[in-house]
Image: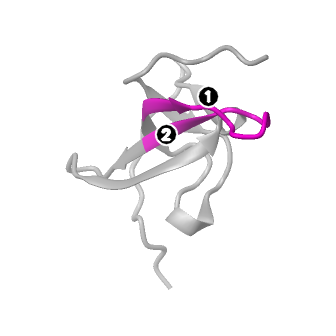
Amino acid sequence: MMMKLELYQYIALCRDFPEYNLKQGDVAMLIDYVTHPSGGEDGYVLEVFNAAGDSIAVFTVPMSAVEKMPSDAVLAIRPLAELK
């Protein structure tokens, strides 16, 4: 069983979520817990903000898709829409 992270902390994504144009390493706020309805992996509700602090997405991911923000990491910004 995975240990739950604390609510209302910033976390890092452990994998890409192309449906939201989010990538591994992007930062989100953990805003709620979700119990899997049929006994599978429980999840987290995340909120993603742009660099100006505006909310741009709220979605649910499995617990294994996030990690606590590492203390030795550097935050960076990137365009949400990939330039073609």
Residue to which mark 2 is pinned: 45
Give, as a three-letter code, the residue at label 1: Glu
> In terms of secondary structure, where does tag 2 sit?
strand
Decide if residue 41 is on the left or right side of residue 50.
Answer: right
In percent of the image, x 79 and y 16: which residue is there?
1
Residue to which mark 1 is pinned: 67
Is residue 41 placed above or below 49 in the rendered structure?
Answer: above
Quadrant in which residue 75 is drawn: top left
Q: Are marks 2 and 1 in contact (CB under 8 Å)?
A: no
Report, in whole angstroms, how far the alpha carbon at label 2 lies from the one at label 1.
13 Å
In percent of the image, x 39 and y 51: which residue is there?
77
In percent of the image, x 42 and y 58: which residue is there?
78
Label 2: few (<14), some or many (≥20) within 10 Å?
Answer: some
Asked if the stretch drawn in magenta spans residue 54, the answer is no
In this rendered view, identify the residue nearer to me: 78 or 53: 53
Q: Which residues are magenta?
A: 30-46
Is residue 4 placed above or below 60 in the rendered structure?
Answer: above
Asked if the stretch drawn in magenta spans residue 41, the answer is yes
Q: Nearer the viewer, mark 2 or mark 1?
A: 2
